[in-house]
Image (tube, grey):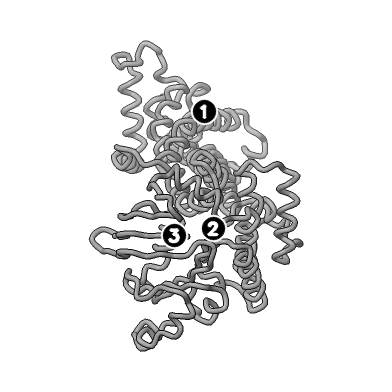
C-alpha cells in the first residue's frame, strides 16, 4: 500500500509541476481523439439519424452491422486499419502507418459505429411521438425531420461526447497503429502501458489520474446534456 | 354533409383491431367515441385524423373521396388540430410551442404573437408564456396543447380523452372552450370514458366494442335506446 501511496504523491507532484512530457502526451491524446471523433461524427451522426427516422431497404441490415461493430475489440479495429495502411495495403502509399494519423484511422473505425448507434437509439426514442406531433401541427416531412433533429440535439451532442470518451481511453488500436513513439504517437493509454512495464509506476499513475479526470469531465458533460 | 368510412379495417399482424363496414359521422357537429379499453377508439380517431394511413377501406369527407396518401394527409393536417391524452411538448418556451402550428403554416411573426397571446389568455396561462414547456406539470402541458390546437383555428378538432390530467376547474374551462368551438361550427371528434361529459358536449355518438361499432347515431336517440342500455356496453358508460 505504501508503494501505491508514494507513487500517488509523486504522480500528484508531476501534475502540479505541469511536467512537460505529461502535458505533451495529454495534448496529443486529446488531438487524436478529437480528430477521430470529429470525422466519425460527420458520418456517424447523420447515419444514426437517417436510420432512426427513415424507412428504406437495407435499414435493418445496416443497423445489425452497426450493432455488431459496437462490440468489436479495439485491437481488431487496429488490425483492420493496419491492413489498410501497411505498405502492402490499399492506402500503404500514403505512408501513414506509425503516425498519429494512423491512430485516427483506427479510432475512427472504433468510434463511428458507437456514435451512429447512440444517435440512432436516442433519436428513435423521440422520433415516433415528436414526428407525429410535428406532422399533426402542419409540418411538412422536412419540417418534421428538422423539429425531431432540433429536439434530439442534446442527445446527439451527448452521443458524440460519449464517443470521444470511448476513443480517448482506447489502447489496442493506438498501440498497433502508432507504435508508441515518444513525442509522435505516444498517447495517454499507450504511455500508461509502457511506463508501467518500465517500472515507472508514478508516471503511469499521473497519466492514469489525468485520464480519469478526462472521463469525469466527459461523464459530467453527458449527464448535463441528458438533463436538458 | 358526412364523414363516411366504408369497409374500414385495421389489423396489427393477424389481429384485427377495427372492422367497420359502414359509418357516417356528421360534419360540423361534435361526435363522441366511447367504448371499453381495447375497443379501437384511438385507432379510429387516428384513422379519421389521417395520422394512421395503414388501414383498408375508404374515407370520404362530404362528397370528396380521401386518397390514402401522405400528401393528402399533410394537407388535411393544415385544416385540423389534435389534443392528445399525453401531449408532447417541444423543448422550447410555452409561447413557441403554442405558436408552432402557425409558424409551420408560414404565418408572420406579428400575427403569431397576437394570436398566441390571445390563446394563452383564453386558457389562463399567460404567466407561463416564457416557461420551458417540457418543465410544466401534466395539467399545464394539457392546457398548452389545447391552446396549441385552438390557435390554428382548425376546421376539424380531434381530442383524445380531454379531461385526463386536468383538475375540476380546468375541465370546466376546457368544456367551455369545446362548446365555443362547437358553436363556431367546427367538426369535433372526441374520445371520452365519461358519458356525462360526452353528453354535455356531443351531438352524436359512436359506441365501439372489440373493433366493431355497437351503436352510432344522434346522442338523444342512443340515450333513449333500450336495447343499447340493456347491452353489456352500457356498463362502461
Q: Secondary structure at mark 2?
A: strand
**B127 vs A180: above or below:** below
Which residue is identified by label 2?
A: B156
Question: Could you tell me which residue is drawn at 53 percent across and 79 percent down?
Answer: B199
Q: Secondary structure at mark 3?
A: strand
Q: Rounded to the nearest whole Å, what is the CA distance between mark 3 and mark 2?
A: 11 Å
Residue B153, image x, y percentages: 63, 55
Residues tagged 1 and 2 counted as in contact (Cβ below 8 A): no
Which label lies toward us, 3 or 2? Answer: 3
Which label lies toward us, 1 or 2? Answer: 2
- Residue B181 occupies which quadrant of the picture? bottom right
**Which mark is on residue B3?**
3
Do dots 3 and 2 share one subunit?
yes
User: From the viewer's perspective, is B112 left or right of A37?
Assistant: right
Question: Could you tell me which residue is drawn at 26 percent across and 63 percent down?
Answer: B15
**Label 2: chain?**
B
Amino acid at each position: 500500500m505504501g508503494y501505491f501511496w508514494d507513487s500517488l504523491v509523486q504522480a500528484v507532484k508531476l501534475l502540479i509541476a505541469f511536467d512537460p512530457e505529461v502535458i505533451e502526451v495529454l495534448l496529443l491524446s486529446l488531438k487524436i481523439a478529437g480528430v477521430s471523433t470529429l470525422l466519425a461524427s460527420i458520418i456517424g451522426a447523420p447515419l444514426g439519424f437517417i436510420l432512426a427516422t427513415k424507412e428504406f431497404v437495407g435499414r435493418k441490415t445496416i443497423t445489425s452491422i452497426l450493432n455488431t461493430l459496437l462490440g468489436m475489440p479495439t485491437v481488431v479495429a487496429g488490425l483492420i486499419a493496419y491492413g489498410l495502411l501497411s505498405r502492402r495495403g490499399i492506402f500503404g502509399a500514403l505512408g501513414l502507418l506509425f503516425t498519429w494519423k494512423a491512430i485516427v484511422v483506427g479510432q475512427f473505425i472504433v468510434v463511428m459505429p458507437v456514435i451512429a448507434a447512440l444517435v440512432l437509439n436516442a433519436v428513435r426514442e423521440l422520433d415516433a411521438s415528436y414526428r407525429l406531433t410535428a406532422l399533426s401541427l402542419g409540418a411538412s416531412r422536412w419540417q418534421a425531420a428538422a423539429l425531431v433533429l432540433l429536439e434530439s440535439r442534446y442527445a446527439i451532442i451527448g452521443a458524440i461526447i460519449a464517443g470521444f470518451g470511448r476513443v480517448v481511453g482506447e489502447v489496442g488500436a493506438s498501440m498497433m497503429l502508432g507504435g508508441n513513439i515518444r513525442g509522435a504517437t505516444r498517447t495517454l493509454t499507450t504511455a500508461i502501458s509502457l511506463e508501467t512495464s518500465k517500472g515507472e509506476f508514478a508516471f503511469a499513475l499521473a497519466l492514469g489520474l489525468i485520464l480519469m479526470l478526462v472521463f469525469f469531465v466527459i461523464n459530467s458533460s453527458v449527464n448535463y446534456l441528458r438533463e436538458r | 354533409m358526412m364523414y363516411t368510412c366504408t369497409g374500414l379495417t385495421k389489423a396489427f399482424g393477424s389481429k384485427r383491431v377495427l372492422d367497420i363496414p359502414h359509418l357516417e359521422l356528421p360534419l360540423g357537429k361534435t361526435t363522441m367515441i366511447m367504448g371499453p379499453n381495447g375497443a379501437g377508439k384511438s385507432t379510429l380517431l387516428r384513422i379519421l385524423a389521417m395520422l394512421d394511413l395503414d388501414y383498408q377501406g375508404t374515407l370520404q369527407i362530404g362528397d370528396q373521396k380521401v386518397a390514402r396518401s401522405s400528401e393528402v394527409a399533410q394537407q388535411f393536417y393544415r385544416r385540423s388540430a389534435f389534443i392528445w391524452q399525453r401531449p408532447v411538448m417541444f423543448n422550447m418556451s410555452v409561447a413557441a410551442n403554442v405558436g408552432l402550428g402557425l409558424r409551420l403554416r408560414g404565418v408572420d411573426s406579428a400575427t403569431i404573437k397576437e394570436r398566441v397571446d390571445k390563446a394563452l389568455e383564453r386558457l389562463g396561462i399567460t404567466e407561463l408564456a416564457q416557461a420551458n414547456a417540457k418543465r410544466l406539470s401534466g395539467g399545464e402541458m394539457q392546457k398548452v396543447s389545447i391552446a396549441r390546437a385552438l390557435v390554428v383555428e382548425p376546421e376539424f378538432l380531434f381530442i383524445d380523452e380531454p379531461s385526463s390530467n386536468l383538475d375540476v376547474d380546468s375541465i370546466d374551462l376546457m368544456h367551455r372552450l369545446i362548446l365555443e368551438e362547437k358553436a363556431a361550427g367546427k367538426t369535433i371528434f372526441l374520445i371520452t370514458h365519461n358519458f356525462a361529459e360526452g353528453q354535455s358536449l356531443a351531438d352524436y355518438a359512436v359506441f365501439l366494442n372489440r373493433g366493431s361499432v355497437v351503436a352510432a347515431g344522434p346522442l338523444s336517440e342512443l340515450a333513449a335506446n333500450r336495447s343499447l342500455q340493456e347491452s353489456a356496453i352500457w356498463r362502461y358508460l
